[in-house]
Image: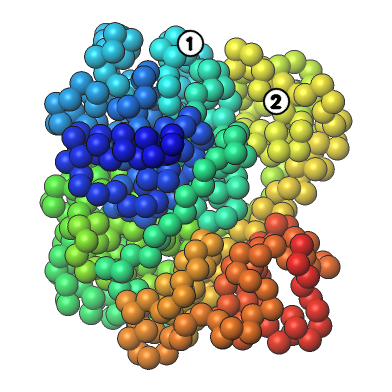
């Protein structure tokens, strides 16, 4: 009976507050979980109404909602969208570095008095102990975390304060949590659940296929061929678009070459001053930059409806990054084109970017510091000489192996039964090696996507654990008549079944393509296996 009541409430609020006459089934499932005060992890594609999943229940649940979002521009868009409805149950305010202390105090008072329902904040703001106390005193009823993939060590927008969010949420009273993202493969989903400490969450992963995006991949034997394919795209379509490149240097060089060829382009990368990046971001959204050449730094907050195409001038590091970046095209629902131009050498470049393993001595010394005396992150940076980013990475590894633990007053120490510093460093290094193996397997899966002769959407969605029964009809292989429905009915194990391999351990069957199957193993990542060999040699067994 409660489920029926919640459904009725949700539909009525959607209609009266947002003028929405219908909701998608996956939206409803997540909203019901929020209404029941359950934690939830929601993975839905761009434009599928993720924000509504917390906004509509929040308007019905007594008490304020705290929204953690990584970008001020993204926050501002969502705040403007809520406030333009001029409804008190939807009013939103913000605390950020852009507001003065007086404005921040006024925002808190609006929430405290009930004049505002939503408080938007960045994880960096929330990491301040004084700010935590202020928000804890508000007794938030719900915590919504946008761009939740940033929480994961696998997330390509890694931020140390995001990794600490699980502890920060506890510090403000541990209200129910809904985590939202447009892309999260199974390892990322598991990491989000673990790091946030989600309690038996409702997990909604649905509708990741984007039928309005035409997926196209071209292997480029030479750099000249890659350039000519890009120019052909730009001449065919003069609408706004994004070109992703792998390095800052290639970002600047390609922009210069495009300008010389008569294409108005600007470049954007993480090495530019913050102010310059902000101006470029706003100029692109305002249709003042027709072609943006960018590294992966140009990402979150690009909520521009008219992006007609996205091109990649090299193989991305993983399908996670690729899916996130092509998701910026076609947000208005109109047909859009995504083109991947790659070479085999791109794989070696991504291997280089994966980087080496953490320093054993730094892990050991940091574990020893934690055993000696609990300290804040600032104190640990001063005592260890580590950067904030490196410290966050090492702490995450040490926490994973039971050698680091959050204490009161934002101090970090070692658990009572923590391993000795040398043992802790050895275990953390082993975990880092495992992660490196998984990351390399993700790059292998990206190459497999580029090389597949089957339906590209089938290949891409299988990586994220979503099975397509038919071909997509909106990729180059489908149009060429090469793609066939996944599997032939003779699969040795059902899709999404748990299997065991003698050497690689436990795994999850993701998909079948012709006579091959893809399995995600906990320890070594993604592997593509021959189905005949699996059958003949009994390589896998049900777990």
Q: Nearer the viewer, residue 260 or 530?
A: 530
Residue 133 numbered mark, or none: 1
**Which residue is identified by label 2?**
405
- Please state the horizontal and vertical placement of residue 135, each as a whole percent of the image: 43, 15
Which quarter of the image is occupied by the N terminus? top left
Q: So how many labels did they put on this image?
A: 2
Q: Quadrant of the C terminus?
A: bottom right
Residue at x 39% of width, y 39% of height: 4
Task: Answer with the quarter of the image where residue 377 lies.
Answer: top right
| Circles 1 and 2: CB atoms closer than 8 Å | no
Q: Secondary structure at mark 2?
A: strand
- Residue 13's x, y, as percent? 25, 34
Q: Residue at x 77, y 72 (%)?
A: 540
Q: Secondary structure at mark 1?
A: helix
Looking at this view, is 157 or 542 the one in front?
A: 542
- Is residue 382 visible in this depiction of the protein? no
Q: Quarter of the image holding residue 455?
A: bottom left
């Amino acid at each position: 009976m409660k489920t029926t009541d919640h459904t009725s409430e949700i539909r009525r609020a959607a209609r009266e507050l947002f003028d929405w006459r219908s909701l998608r089934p996956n939206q409803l499932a997540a909203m019901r979980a929020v209404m029941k005060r359950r934690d939830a992890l929601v993975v839905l594609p761009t434009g599928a109404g993720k924000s509504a999943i917390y906004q509509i229940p929040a308007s019905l649940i007594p008490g304020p909602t705290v929204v953690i979002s990584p970008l001020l521009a993204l926050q501002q868009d969502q705040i403007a969208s809520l406030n333009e409805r001029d409804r008190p149950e939807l009013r939103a305010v913000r605390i950020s570095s852009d507001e003065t202390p007086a404005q921040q105090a006024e925002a808190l008072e609006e929430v405290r008095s009930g004049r505002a329902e939503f408080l938007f904040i960045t994880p960096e703001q929330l990491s301040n102990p004084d700010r935590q106390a202020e928000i804890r005193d508000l007794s938030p009823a719900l915590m919504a975390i946008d761009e939740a993939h940033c929480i994961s060590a696998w997330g390509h927008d890694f931020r140390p304060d995001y990794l600490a969010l699980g502890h920060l949420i506890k510090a403000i009273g541990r209200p129910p949590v809904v985590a939202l993202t447009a892309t999260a493969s199974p390892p990322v989903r598991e990491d989000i659940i673990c790091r946030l400490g989600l309690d038996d969450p409702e997990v909604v992963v649905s509708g990741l296929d984007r039928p309005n995006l035409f997926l196209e991949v071209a292997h480029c034997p030479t750099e000249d061929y890659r350039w000519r394919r890009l120019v052909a795209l730009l001449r065919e379509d003069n609408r706004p678009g994004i070109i992703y490149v792998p390095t800052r240097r290639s970002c600047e060089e390609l922009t210069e070459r495009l300008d010389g060829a008569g294409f108005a382009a600007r470049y954007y990368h993480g090495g530019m001053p913050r102010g310059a990046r902000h101006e470029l971001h706003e100029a692109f959204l305002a249709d003042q930059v027709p072609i943006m050449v960018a590294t992966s730094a140009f990402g979150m907050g690009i909520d521009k409806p008219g992006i007609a195409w996205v091109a990649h001038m090299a193989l991305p590091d993983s399908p996670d990054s690729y899916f996130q970046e092509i998701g910026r095209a076609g947000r208005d629902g109109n047909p859009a084109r995504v083109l991947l131009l790659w070479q085999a050498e791109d794989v070696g470049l991504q291997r280089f970017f994966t980087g080496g393993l953490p320093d054993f001595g730094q892990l050991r010394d940091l574990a020893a510091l934690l055993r000696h005396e609990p300290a804040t992150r600032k104190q640990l940076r001063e005592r260890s000489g580590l950067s904030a980013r490196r410290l966050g990475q090492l702490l995450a590894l040490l926490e994973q192996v039971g050698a680091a633990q959050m204490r009161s007053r934002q101090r970090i120490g070692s658990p009572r039964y923590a391993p000795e510093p040398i043992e802790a460093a050895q275990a953390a290094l082993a975990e880092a090696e495992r992660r490196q193996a998984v990351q390399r397997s993700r790059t292998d899966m990206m190459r497999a996507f580029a090389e597949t002769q089957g339906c590209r959407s089938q290949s891409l969605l299988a990586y994220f654990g979503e099975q397509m029964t038919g071909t997509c009809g909106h990729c180059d292989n489908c149009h060429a008549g090469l793609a066939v429905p996944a599997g032939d009915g003779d699969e040795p194990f059902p899709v999404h079944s748990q299997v065991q391999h003698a050497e690689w351990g436990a795994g999850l069957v993701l998909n079948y393509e012709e006579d091959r199957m893809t399995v995600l193993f906990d320890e070594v990542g993604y592997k593509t296996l021959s189905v005949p060999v699996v059958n003949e040699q009994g390589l896998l067994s049900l777990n």
